[in-house]
């Protein structure tokens, strides 16, 4: 086989990175031995010379089958879901579909979208939601529209985001879902990108929320060389314990039927919270900027006699306390998972008023107990948590606060979480960040590479009355590529597509404070200040 093409690619790689071939291969994210992984590119005869999209169908990589490589004209990709505008505005790109089979039971689908022109020289991985089971086409489209070579995966199975039946009897598929699929997607995606453009991406970023947030933290913890920068939000990072938190209110109601709260009362509870805490930040706007300062007691809205839509019974007050408390071990009192944050009340319908959440029930049926007929009433918050920790936490959870390997290779991490998230409590991100700070040498040291931005009034990954619309990848790129650490991120609230408020998001534990003059709907009139108490 002629080696001139590979030698040319190697010289280009060295020019871009100034590293040895082994180091280069590792920077590209290849798994296993660095030189062996780089040699995988040599299996494709026209490696460095062929640039057509169709020619990528002949690309051979370990445990990988390219099933389709086709050019897509600008605006020609079929719209998906309700958010169709981004697809209509897509530039022309090369769409590569591949199947990865690292084990005999693996069936990982990935798609790599490569801008036909105007590639910015960077690579972007995007995440999933829930139990995954599908390709995130919207995120792919967003990435390509900004000039990124973008990759996504279904994590190794097909299904809805609430369905975990794929894991029953298929332990390798659970590993694929937990971390292997995203890592290999990244490795193969970089190789396909390098083959198409005849040069490797000079920088690689991750962007994901919810399950995508967990995936981002998992990458930083397990595969710190995969990405130069990671933006992760509202992460399901402590996924096994999150499953117990998701059914905690329902278990209490099952054992105390009188505690059930009609959904119509949730807005009333939220209004009581606003009366108690909205003005603490000096701006009465229906947004609680710092829920950690709020000391709301649900007993203040307890009914004086009987029951009514404007108050809570004594049993319902106790349920509200349980929701804020979060699940604890009934024998030791040890916290299993933080409770929902104050200001999340309007979204309690899913977790408090709708019975046990399906996404969690699927975990217990198809992963933990491997019994489709398992009954929710049998759940034990002592014995079953211990079993879950022993069997699945090492596989599924991304909770290691030691990010020294990620930091050492220059990685930057932007974390964010909506304070009003009713599905994954914002308090979990705060708790994890405190652990990172304690592990990585203090706040000042940690902020050199990792910053947390709490978003007032934001629900799960978006929506809500707060400043919920903001760029995640742009500030990350500025930090990684130019050394400009984000001291604030400007976020907006939009109504019917039009911006009606902007606010700065501040690196925790700082909060945005109004200067006392000018419109409170303009971010220019706010400054980031250290709050008196972070906890």
Image (tube, rainbow, N blue to C red):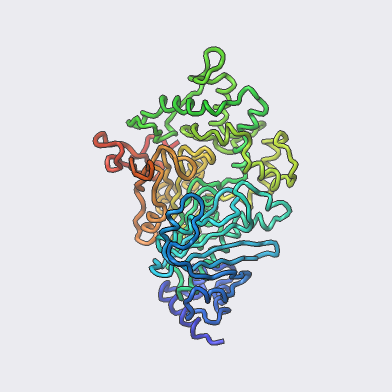
Q: Is residue 415 above or below residue 380?
A: below
The residue shown at (54%, 53%) is 128
Between 35 and 134, the one lying in front of the other is 134
The residue shown at (41%, 55%) is 473
Q: Is residue 69 left or right of residue 244?
A: left
Query: Image quarter for residue 197?
Result: bottom left
Q: Is residue 48 visible?
A: yes
Q: Quadrant of the N terminus?
A: bottom right
Query: How many numbered badges does the structure rendering display?
Result: 0
Q: Is residue 173 above or below residue 307?
A: below
The image position of residue 302, as x and y in percent, is 52, 18
The image position of residue 324, as x and y in percent, is 53, 31
Q: Quadrant of the C terminus?
A: top left
The image position of residue 69, as x and y in percent, is 54, 70
Between 336 and 421, the one lying in front of the other is 421
Q: Is residue 29 above or below residue 209?
A: below
The residue shown at (55%, 27%) is 321
The image position of residue 53, as x and y in percent, is 49, 73
Q: Is residue 328 visible?
A: no
């Amino acid at each position: 086989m002629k080696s001139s093409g590979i030698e040319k690619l190697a010289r280009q790689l060295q020019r871009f990175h100034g590293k040895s071939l082994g180091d280069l291969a590792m920077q590209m994210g290849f798994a296993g031995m660095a030189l062996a992984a780089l040699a995988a590119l040599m299996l494709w005869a026209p490696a460095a010379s062929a640039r057509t999209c169709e020619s990528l169908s002949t690309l051979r990589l370990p445990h990988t089958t390219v099933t389709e490589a086709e050019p897509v004209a600008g605006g020609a990709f079929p719209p998906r879901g309700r958010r169709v505008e981004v697809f209509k505005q897509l530039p022309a790109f090369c769409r590569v579909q591949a199947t990865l089979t690292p084990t005999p039971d693996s069936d990982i689908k990935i798609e790599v979208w490569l801008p036909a022109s105007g590639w910015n020289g960077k690579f972007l991985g995007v995440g999933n939601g829930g139990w995954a089971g599908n390709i995130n086409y919207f995120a792919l489209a967003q990435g390509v529209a900004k000039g990124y070579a973008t990759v996504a995966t279904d994590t190794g199975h097909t299904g809805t985001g609430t369905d975990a039946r794929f894991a029953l009897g298929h332990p390798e598929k659970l590993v694929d879902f937990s971390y292997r699929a995203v890592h290999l997607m990244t490795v193969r995606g970089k190789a396909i990108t390098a083959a198409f453009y005849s040069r490797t991406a000079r920088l690689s970023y991750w962007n994901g929320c919810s399950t995508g947030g967990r995936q981002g933290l998992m990458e930083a913890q397990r595969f710190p060389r995969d990405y130069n920068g990671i933006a992760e939000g509202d992460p399901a990072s402590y996924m096994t314990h999150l499953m117990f938190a998701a059914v905690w209110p329902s278990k209490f109601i099952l054992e105390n039927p009188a505690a059930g709260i009609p959904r119509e009362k949730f807005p009333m509870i939220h209004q009581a919270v606003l009366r108690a805490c909205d003005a603490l930040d000096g701006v009465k706007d229906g947004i609680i900027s710092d829920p950690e300062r709020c000391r709301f007691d649900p007993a203040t809205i307890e009914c004086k006699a009987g029951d009514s839509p404007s108050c809570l019974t004594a049993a319902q007050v106790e349920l509200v306390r349980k929701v804020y408390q979060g699940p604890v071990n009934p024998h030791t009192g040890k916290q299993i998972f933080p409770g929902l944050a104050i200001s999340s009340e309007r979204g309690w319908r899913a977790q408090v008023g709708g019975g046990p959440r399906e996404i969690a029930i699927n975990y217990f049926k198809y992963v933990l107990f491997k019994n489709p007929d398992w009954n929710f009433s049998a759940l034990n918050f002592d014995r079953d948590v211990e079993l879950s920790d022993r069997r699945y936490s090492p596989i599924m959870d991304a909770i290691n606060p030691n990010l020294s390997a990620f930091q050492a290779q220059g990685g930057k991490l932007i974390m964010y979480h909506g304070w009003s998230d009713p599905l994954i409590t914002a308090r979990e991100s705060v708790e994890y960040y405190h652990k990172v700070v304690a592990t990585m040498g203090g706040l000042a040291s940690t902020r050199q590479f990792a910053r947390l931005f709490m978003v007032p009034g934001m629900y799960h990954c978006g929506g809500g009355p707060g400043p919920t619309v903001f760029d995640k990848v742009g500030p990350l790129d500025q930090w990684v590529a130019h050394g400009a650490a984000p001291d604030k991120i400007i976020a907006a609230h939009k109504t019917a597509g039009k911006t009606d408020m902007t606010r700065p998001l501040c690196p925790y534990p700082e909060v945005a404070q109004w200067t006392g003059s000018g419109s409170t709907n303009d971010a220019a009139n706010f400054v980031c200040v250290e709050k008196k108490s972070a906890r």
